[in-house]
Amino acid sequence: MRPARFELHRPTSLEDALAFKAVYADEATFHAGGTELLVALKARVLHYEHVIDLKQVPELRSIHTREDGTLVIGALSSHHTIARDPLVCRLLPGYAELSDNVANIRVRVAGTLGGVLCFAEPHADAPTMLCALDARMVLASPERTRTVPSREFHLSEFTTAREENEILVAIEVPPQSGGTRSAYRCFGHTERPAVGVAAVWSSDGPKRLSLWTGAITSTPQRLSATEDAANALKPDLTFQEVWTRLAPVLAAEAASIEAHDDLHGGADYKRHLVSVLAQRAMEACW
Ligand SMILES: Cc1cc2nc3c(=O)[nH]c(=O)nc-3n(C[C@H](O)[C@H](O)[C@H](O)COP(=O)(O)OP(=O)(O)OC[C@H]3O[C@@H](n4cnc5c(N)ncnc54)[C@H](O)[C@@H]3O)c2cc1C
């Protein structure tokens, strides 16, 4: 089916994009790569009189670091661009690898990081990893620019902390210490993940493991009991010794996740996947 008619606007600055939205309000939406939006418009699940294409807004494209080492990824960066970006590959190889495995090449080239975050379909990879990395979302409206922690950005399925008139400008990932490693592992029978687990493990500093799971629930979920157990361990253990201690804690924590049977798998099967994928992600960090 074709989408209902709409007027396409192609602003060339962030200011103009926000101004279009201010004028057309609820009758307008933003378009980035269109991989989710166009499907919904064609199926007539969504309808807008005005579509504001963000592709020519340069402020949304840059990938760079700040002086303090914060990595800034423009919201319009495609998964493909992120996977090949030299800075991301050097500073966050685990995240580059995640981006390289999203969906298929067509979705990776067209689909953007901002799009997957704002659409908030739970079966996605990036939100889980960004929570484990304690990233921040930079949101701009005509009145102000504000920052929301990634851990507070996704509120439920298809719902985020982004206000209707705000554009997600960039994602900021705080600098990781030299001894920090991150990895993401996921599994699914469809193109989207049924379950994903992200681990960020540092061998220096007081806090050592950040462990999150996603796709199994409507928003990413912290595996805090396993984190606490890991952070209480002596630093000189082998991975096998660490895993022997963490496995029962993780299994109990995974068993308590409020999962549901759906097309991606049975609830118990997906809870089991959390343990398997967490072990693999942690071992990859090790
Ligand atoms: C077949 C298929 C398989 C997929 N598999 C995976 C997978 O394995 N893993 C995974 O993580 N994801 C997967 N996805 C999701 C994919 O990552 C997203 O479709 C893509 O990143 C969305 O980006 P987009 O630029 O196309 O968003 P669009 O479709 O352009 O926009 C999506 C929504 O976000 C809003 N939006 C977009 N950018 C902004 C912004 N900067 N500020 C404010 N609002 C904005 C739009 O208004 C719209 O509501 C899959 C998608 C498809 C279609």
Image (cartoon, rainbow, N blue to C red):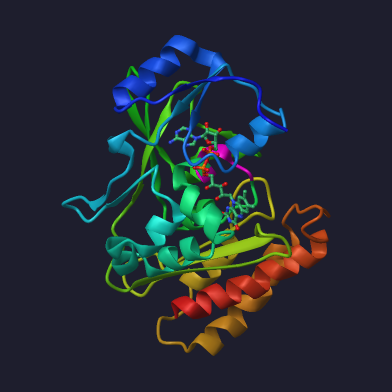
> With respect to residue 272, does 266 lie above or below?
above
Q: Quadrant of ligand 1?
A: top right
* 43 is higher (above) or lower (below) than 228: above
Q: Residue furthest top?
A: 23
Q: Within the image, what quadrant is residue 195 found in?
A: bottom right
Instruction: Give the quadrant of the N terminus.
Output: top right
Residue at left offset 40%, top offset 32%: 54
The answer to which image quadrant residue 145 occupies is top left
The image shows residue 183, relative to residue 2, as above or below, that is: below
What residue appears at the point 43 percent right and 51 percent down from the top-left corner? 78
Query: Within the magenta stretch, is there residue 120?
Result: yes
Residue 83 visible: yes
Q: Is residue 240 left or right of residue 274?
A: left
Q: Is residue 25 left or right of residue 192?
A: left
Q: Which residues are magenta?
A: 116-121
Tell whether 23 sits left or right of 122.
left
Residue 167, by quadrant, is top left
Quadrant in which the C terminus is drawn: bottom left
The reply to whether residue 249 is in sight is: no
Residue in the foreground of this view, choosing between 253 and 62: 62
* Rendering coords of residue 236 (x, y %): 40, 87
Q: Residue at x 55, y 15 (%)?
A: 26
Question: Could you say which is closer to the camera, residue 31 or residue 252?
Answer: 31
Rendering coords of residue 228 (x, y %): 52, 65
Q: Which residue corresponds to the image point at 70% horizontal and 69% vertical from the top-left?
A: 273
Q: With respect to residue 225, does 58 lie above or below?
A: above
Position of residue 171 measured from the top left corner of the image (x, y, whole percent):
37, 45
